[in-house]
Amino acid sequence: MICFETCYFAFLLFFEQKCWGLLPTQLMTFVTSHAIACEVFKSLNKGNPPFMKEMFTQNETMYNLRDGTTLIQPKFNTITYGRNTFTYYGSHIWNLLPNDLKNNVNYDTFKRLLKDWDGPRCCCSLCYFEYV
């Protein structure tokens, strides 16, 4: 699923200025969240095979909310087969994105704007003490 383009994107992010001060776990969280956001964008905009689009369900509300493009995060019973799945984590990352990123139609524009997004904060035990 992760292709050469994603690995090259991660390589470029590593050498950007804002990645120099990150711990390895923070860098891994940063790179994987960007790669997953790219895959979700391609899945929702018919850039991936149809079975990938079926993994995500858009949250439909009868109200006109500011963020109308959220995805439903599936409920889970176990960590391994629930929270650590691409469907759950992909919808979680997508819901964290700002609206100007989600509303793009062009994949190249999406990737360019995604480079400025800091991504989710790493919550592992190694990174926890840096934020305290």
Image (cartoon, helix red, strand yellow):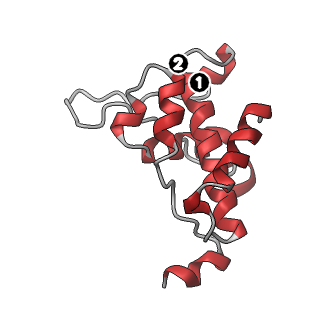
Placement of 42 over or under 99, stated as above or below = above
Can residue 12 be seen here? The reply is yes
The amino acid at mark 2 is: Asn
Q: Is residue 11 left or right of residue 70?
A: right
The amino acid at mark 1 is: Lys
Residue placed under numbered mark 2 in the picture: 45
**Residue at 77%, 36% in the rendered image:** 2
**Residue at 65%, 78% in the rendered image:** 125
Q: Is residue 40 left or right of residue 71?
A: right
Q: Is residue 62 left or right of residue 73?
A: left
Q: Is residue 50 left or right of residue 8?
A: left
Residue 73 in the image, given as x and y percentages of width and height: 51, 42
Q: In this orientation, which residue lies closer to the viewer: 102 or 106?
A: 106
Residue 5 in the image, given as x and y percentages of width and height: 73, 32
- Residue 97: name its quadrant: top left
Q: In this orientation, which residue lies closer to the viewer: 112 or 52?
A: 112
Contact between marks 1 and 2 (CB within 8 A): the answer is: yes
Residue placed under numbered mark 1 in the picture: 42
Neighbor class of circle 2 (other Cα within 10 Å; few <14, some 14-19, many 20+) is: some
Placement of 36 over or under 80, stated as above or below = above
In this figure, what is the number of numbered marks? 2
